[in-house]
Amino acid sequence: MPNYSATTLQQFATQLFQAAGVPSEEAAIVAASLVEANLRGHDSHGVMRIRDYVRQLRIGELVPGVELAVHSETAAMLAADAQFGFGQVQARRLIQRLMDKAGSLGIASGTLMRCGHIGRLGEWVELAAEAGFAALVAVNDNGSLRVVAPPGGTEPQISTNPLAIGVPTSDGPLVLDISTSAVANGKIRLALAEGVPCPDGWLLDGAGEPTNDPEVRRADPPGTIQPLGGAQAGYKGFGLGLILDILIGGLSGGFCPPQEDADSCNNVLAIVWQPQQFAGTEHFLAQADQLIASIRNSRRQVNVERIRLPGDRSREVREQRLQDGIPFDDGNWQRLVKTATELDVALPTTP
């Protein structure tokens, strides 16, 4: 398989969405977001999602061209129905509106219900951090996806419920983007598509025993994804995922598990802070820069070249993939080929 440049892949993705009936502007926004995830090495949140999105468009789980329907708003908060619009479009709108509010009030919080998959959460807190704000974004799956069992249990009860936190620094945004499970569900799906085993510590089978086989997610009874912290400290990850599920589902107007026949969508919780309204931007940046420098320069273990912070790896991968192109395994590429054939879209002629 050849590698494809970000430009080629973005054009191809845009054409696929347009052929599926998505307006040109939205198609370009979603395509750019997915390709950026690939550039950062988050292939589970990249263009492999296109086939799923197209399927959702066909059955009405995704609706192009819709606006945010605000059902509650004050000077410091916003609660809206995303109306099954593309998550990459609606999440951007939410963060931009919360930045406007936080710019004058210092803090703003908002929620979305019935939102399409919002992709890589780090994108949205990075958007805020680049503008000088600090931000937190978290999502649940509306009770429609249960893949994580409680410690000691074997039955999946909650989803991976990821969260991202981003802060500004003098050297650009510092972003933490994690799931409250050991790994994102998309990475299990990626392993299934590639036909490869999962690393140790990701999965448990239906009896609660460790396994590397991603097929356990399709078994009866199904296997589960381990909570963040694994066998030793999984109660922390599960507890965090539990609380986030309640906050997101409860505040947004969406749902928490268990829900029979729940709509497949994201509900979103976001909080944005303007440091200037608190102790001041200068103080915030000074403290962030001081701590980061101290960590970077701290003593290292033998054979460790440098201390890494959140986002370091994705920046390195991005530089490499901008130069060498974005790689694909045959399984995921064939999913795109099949979608293109169904939509009568020509495949890229050059990488």
Image (spheres, rainbow, N blue to C red):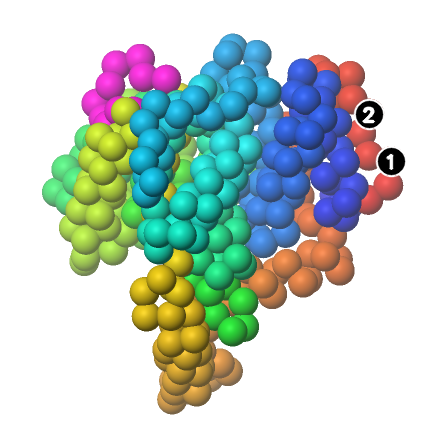
Q: Amino acid at mark 2?
A: Ala
Kindly identify which numbered label has been placed on residue 349. 1
Residue at the top extreme?
A: 59
Magenta segment includes 216:
no
Q: What residue is disc 2 on?
A: 346
Residue furthest to the right? 349
Which image quarter: residue 156? top left
- Label 2 crowd bin: few (<14), some (14–19), many (20+), radius 10 Å: few
Tell me which residue sits at (39%, 25%) in the image.
Answer: 70
Is mark 2 in CB contact (under 8 Å) with mark 1? yes
- Give me the C-alpha separation between circle 2 and circle 1: 8 Å
Determine the secondary structure under disc 2.
loop
- Give the residue type that dot 1 points to: Thr
Residue closest to the eye, 291 or 221: 291
- Residue at screen point 58% across, 47% down: 37
Which percent across, then down, holds residue 198? 42, 46
Is residue 2 shown left or right of residue 174? right
Q: Is residue 8 left or right of residue 168?
A: right
**Helix, strand or loop at mark 1:** loop
Mark 1 neighbour class, 10 Å CA radius: few under 14, some 14 to 19, many 20 or more? few
Residue 325 image offset from top left, x and y in percent: 74, 52
